[in-house]
């Protein structure tokens, strides 16, 4: 494929030669000996004026919704409205001086802390579930736990109740875990064993 040389053609004329039509005719005649390239037809990227008011149609056809599918949706929505909404609530302890002094670690809990190399300010949680509510109900224990945390009876603690699971989680630092666990069992008469959980370690201790 050879290269085509592009060149400029200058046409000199006198303004007294005649009208514009005569000038155009002379120009076309003078350019007859030069090769001409046919310009491609311009295709605009935007829609023409006649198509601007037409609706935009999707490429795919709309889905067909059967009556059976509508009935299933209606049944699901009705059952969702009838279900009882059970929310989760939390309580946090205020900052300040705590009323009661905490006891030192027992030998068993000290071994657990040493074995897992736990930091004293690392968070852990005591889990109280429905198996521990033989002598009381979850709402009674939750109200008492609220008062104890708000009155600074449980150091570094915050608690969460999940009524749909019938479960209370009490979070605290490792430093106060054993004290908090004993307080829960004695003060609220929690039956059975309660379990201490640490993130990524699972249950590490029971009371």
Image (cartoon, rainbow, N blue to C red):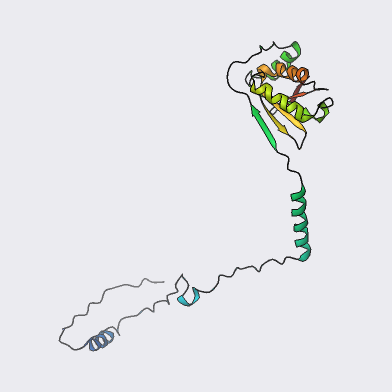
Residue at 65% across, 29% down: 91
Question: Picture quarter containing residue 100?
Answer: top right
Question: Picture quarter containing residue 67?
Answer: bottom right
Q: Considering depth in this image, is 134 or 56 the residue closer to the camera? A: 134
Instruction: Name the spot of residue 142 as percent of width and height, x first.
Output: 73, 28
Relative to 191, 117 lies left or right: left
Question: Picture quarter containing residue 194?
Answer: top right
Q: Considering depth in this image, is 193 or 97 the residue closer to the camera? A: 97
Residue 91 lies, with reference to residue 28, above or below; the image says above
Q: Is residue 94 visible?
A: yes
Instruction: Name the spot of residue 185 as percent of width and height, x first.
Output: 77, 19
Relative to 49, 29 lies left or right: left
Residue 91 lies, with reference to residue 186, above or below; the image says below
Quarter of the figure with the N terminus: bottom left
Residue at 71% across, 24% down: 145
Q: Is residue 125 visible?
A: no
Residue at 69% across, 66% down: 63
Q: Considering depth in this image, is 186 or 117 the residue closer to the camera? A: 186
Instruction: Name the spot of residue 174 as percent of width and height, x first.
Output: 67, 19
Residue at 78% across, 58% down: 72
Q: How many numbered dots are placed on residues in this image?
A: 0
């Amino acid at each position: 494929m050879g290269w085509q040389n592009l060149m400029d053609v200058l046409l000199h004329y006198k303004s007294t030669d005649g009208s514009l039509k005569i000038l155009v005719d002379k120009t076309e005649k003078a350019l007859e000996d030069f090769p001409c390239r046919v310009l491609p037809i311009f295709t605009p990227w935007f829609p023409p004026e006649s198509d601007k008011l037409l609706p935009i149609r999707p490429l795919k056809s709309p889905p067909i919704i059967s009556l059976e599918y509508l009935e299933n949706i209606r049944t699901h929505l009705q059952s969702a409205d009838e279900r009882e909404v059970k929310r989760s609530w939390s309580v946090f302890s205020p900052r300040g001086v705590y009323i009661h002094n905490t006891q030192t670690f027992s030998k068993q809990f000290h071994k657990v802390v040493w074995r897992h190399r736990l930091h004293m300010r690392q968070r852990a949680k005591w889990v109280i579930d429905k198996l521990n509510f033989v002598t009381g109900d979850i709402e009674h224990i939750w109200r008492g736990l609220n008062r104890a945390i708000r009155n600074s009876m449980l150091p570094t603690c915050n608690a969460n109740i999940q009524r749909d699971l019938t479960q209370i989680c009490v979070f605290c630092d490792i430093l106060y875990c054993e004290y908090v666990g004993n307080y829960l069992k004695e003060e609220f008469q929690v039956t059975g064993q309660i379990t201490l959980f640490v993130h990524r370690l699972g249950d590490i201790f029971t009371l």
